[in-house]
Image (spheres, rainbow, N blue to C red):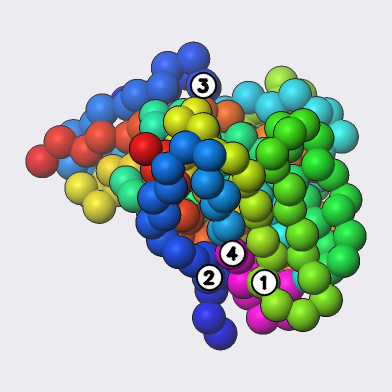
Amino acid sequence: GESVGLHLPTLSVQEGDNSIINCAYSNSASDYFIWYKQESGKGPQFIIDIRSNMDKRQGQRVTVLLNKTVKHLSLQIAATQPGDSAVYFCAETNDMRFGAGTRLTVKP
Amino acid sequence: NAGVMQNPRHLVRRRGQEARLRCSPMKGHSHVYWYRQLPEEGLKFMVYLQKENIIDESGMPKERFSAEFPKEGPSILRIQQVVRGDSAAYFCASQLSGTVNPRYFGPGTRLTVT
């Protein structure tokens, strides 16, 4: 499944599928981006970051892609698990503001 | 290395009382940010502080809210004469000096105004 940025605040996927969460940013001078995961009742948790001189960065089961031309960021989660259910936020560290995020629900 | 600590985790205040929220940053972190989050909404930036210095308070309401980060001790977010609309989760985050670093968030304080 794929969400289109912050205009589609929910994403529902089947366990085992790959998830793609998108995010648009506004500041073309931003040089550093972070993805956070927030589970219900908890604080945001750092997942992965990427600098503006990179197009792609991989972590454990997660990949972040950065397209500076269209000012777009995506988070890909491989083999999504029930424990991945949460709200995901992107943030650009030049801008202290966050969007509403995307709520990912994983169906067993 | 302990993470960002916030206390209390839950705070109940009656209208008109004062609320004090505390945030201890990660060891070695000298930058603290406060955010407010309403249910089903994103994080709203409130204030950015370094020790003994307010760097950016553009997200703070003009009245009743104040924040400090003293040389010693935790950062404090203070809300005077609380109203029901102040009920929210308040998160702080800390960061190493400089901008190109991740921010690490605390578990939040859930303020309920009755």
Task: Classify residue B10 as left or right of residue B30.
Answer: left
Give, as a single range, the part of the protein colored magenta: B22-29
Task: Name the residue tied to disc 3.
Answer: A6
Q: Quadrant of residue A2?
A: top left
Question: Tag 4: residue type?
Answer: Arg
Q: Is residue B73 above or below residue B6?
A: below
Task: Classify residue B33 as left or right of residue B83.
Answer: right
Q: Are marks 2 and 4 in contact (CB under 8 Å)?
A: no
Question: Tag 1: residue type?
Answer: Pro
Report, in whole angstroms, how far the alpha carbon at label 2 lies from the one at label 4.
8 Å
Report, in whole angstroms, how far the alpha carbon at label 1 lies from the one at label 4.
6 Å
Q: Quadrant of residue B75?
A: bottom right
Question: Tag 3: residue type?
Answer: Leu
What is the chain identity of the residue bearing mark 1? B
Give me the residue at 39% from left, 29% from top.
B40
Q: In this rendering, does residue A62 appear at all?
A: no
Task: Name the residue tied to disc 1.
Answer: B74
Q: Are marks 1 and 4 on the same chain?
A: yes
Q: Which mark is residue B22?
A: 4
Question: Tag 2: residue type?
Answer: Met
Q: Are marks 3 and 2 in contact (CB under 8 Å)?
A: no
Q: Are marks 1 and 4 in contact (CB under 8 Å)?
A: yes
| Mark positioned earlier in the residue sequence (1 or 4) | 4
Q: Are marks 3 and 1 in contact (CB under 8 Å)?
A: no
Point out residue B80 in the picture as x, y percentages from the top left corner: 63, 44
Task: Classify residue B3 as left or right of residue B96.
Answer: left
Report, in whole angstroms, how far the alpha carbon at label 3 lies from the one at label 4.
31 Å
Give me the residue at 32% from left, 26% from top.
A11
What is the chain identity of the residue bearing mark 2? B
Report, in whole angstroms, how far the alpha carbon at label 3 lies from the one at label 2.
30 Å
Q: Is residue A100 above or below residue A60?
A: above
What is the chain identity of the residue bearing mark 4? B
